[in-house]
């Protein structure tokens, strides 16, 4: 196994780093600072033609899409730990949350971040901000309604949490945390108290 991850702090490569830590897998981690211009330059495009993060290599095999990468790691190198199999009773919910964190929620979160943090004020569109907040809140309410007073999305911590916690992290760091319900806030605190999350976040250079 020769895993190489290009990690950009605070971006979706955090999901991959977190999964590597949780699963106890070794990888060569090259940390770079987020710089959109450099990510669209030939040197980085040769690594990831999308000019996005994350990208991971397993030998000659290149994989993009953070939630696909974490499932690949668990199933290929960790005997399916933190994943679920078709005959598990929570397999459907596992897949739902694993995909919801990115496919269901990622686009709205990106829009919210663009309209509240990334775009210069003069490029923001008030109607888009309202729409992004409304759709993000809809996603957050769905999470809130499915959480108990303790524990995780499934009976035990899983890749589904690694997927869903990342957009919650974005909601928090862009100061949109008021959109999150009490159970979701407690869930976020619980998950980010894990040693593996802390180690992944500490990797900044
Ligand atoms: N669905 C992709 C999204 C990748 C993505 O959009 N990454 C962001 C950072 S979190 C990025 O690279 N942005 C740079 C850009 O769009 O220029 C995944 O989950 O890997």
Image (cartoon, grey):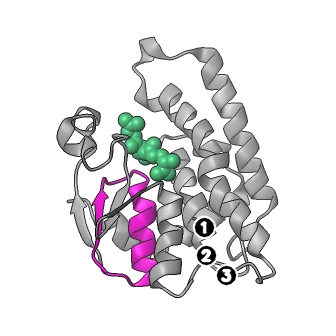
Residue labelled with disc 1: 161
Question: Magenta part of the protein: which range?
Answer: 1-26
Q: Residue at x 67, y 24 (%)?
A: 130
- Viewer-proximal residue, 64 or 142? 64
Residues 32 and 150: in front is 32
- Where is 40 relative to 5, above or below? above
Q: CA distance from mark 3 to mark 1?
A: 9 Å
Q: Position of residue 160 (x, y in %)?
A: 63, 67
Measured in 3D between alpha carbons, the distance from the residue under mark 1 to the one under mark 2, in whole angstroms, is 6 Å
Picture quarter containing residue 127?
A: top right
Q: Are marks 1 and 2 in contact (CB under 8 Å)?
A: yes
Query: Who's the residue at 42% across and 65% down the image?
Result: 16
Could you tell which of marks 3 and 1 lies nearer the N-terminus? Answer: 3
The residue wearing badge 3 is 156
Q: Secondary structure at mark 2?
A: loop
- Left/right of residue 64 with respect to residue 156 in the rendered view: left
Taking the image as shown, residue 122 lies to the left or right of residue 59, namely right
Residue displayed at 43% across by 11% down? 122
Q: Which residue is mark 2?
A: 158
Relative image position of residue 145 (x, y in whole percent): 81, 58
Q: Residues within 10 Å of mark 2 (few under 14, many from 20)?
A: many
Crowding at label 1, few (<14), some or many (≥20) Cα neighbours within 10 Å?
A: many
């Amino acid at each position: 196994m020769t895993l190489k991850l290009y990690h950009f702090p605070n971006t979706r490569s955090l999901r991959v780093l977190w999964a590597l830590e949780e699963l106890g897998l070794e990888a060569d981690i090259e940390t770079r600072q987020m710089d959109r211009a450099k990510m669209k330059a030939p040197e980085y495009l040769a690594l990831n033609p999308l000019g996005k993060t994350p990208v991971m290599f397993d030998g000659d095999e290149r994989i993009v899409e953070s939630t696909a990468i974490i499932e690949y790691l668990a199933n290929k190198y960790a005997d399916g730990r933190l994943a679920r199999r078709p005959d598990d009773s929570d397999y459907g919910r596992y897949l739902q949350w694993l995909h919801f964190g990115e496919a269901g929620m990622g686009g709205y979160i990106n829009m919210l971040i663009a309209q509240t943090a990334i775009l210069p004020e003069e490029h923001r569109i008030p109607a888009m901000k309202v729409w992004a907040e409304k759709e993000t809140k809809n996603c957050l309410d769905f999470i809130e309604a499915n959480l108990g007073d303790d524990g995780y999305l499934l009976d035990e911590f899983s890749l589904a949490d690694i997927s869903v916690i990342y957009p919650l992290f974005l909601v928090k760091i862009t100061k949109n945390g008021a959109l999150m319900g009490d159970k979701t806030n407690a869930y976020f605190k619980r998950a980010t108290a894990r040693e593996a999350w802390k180690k992944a976040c500490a990797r900044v250079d």
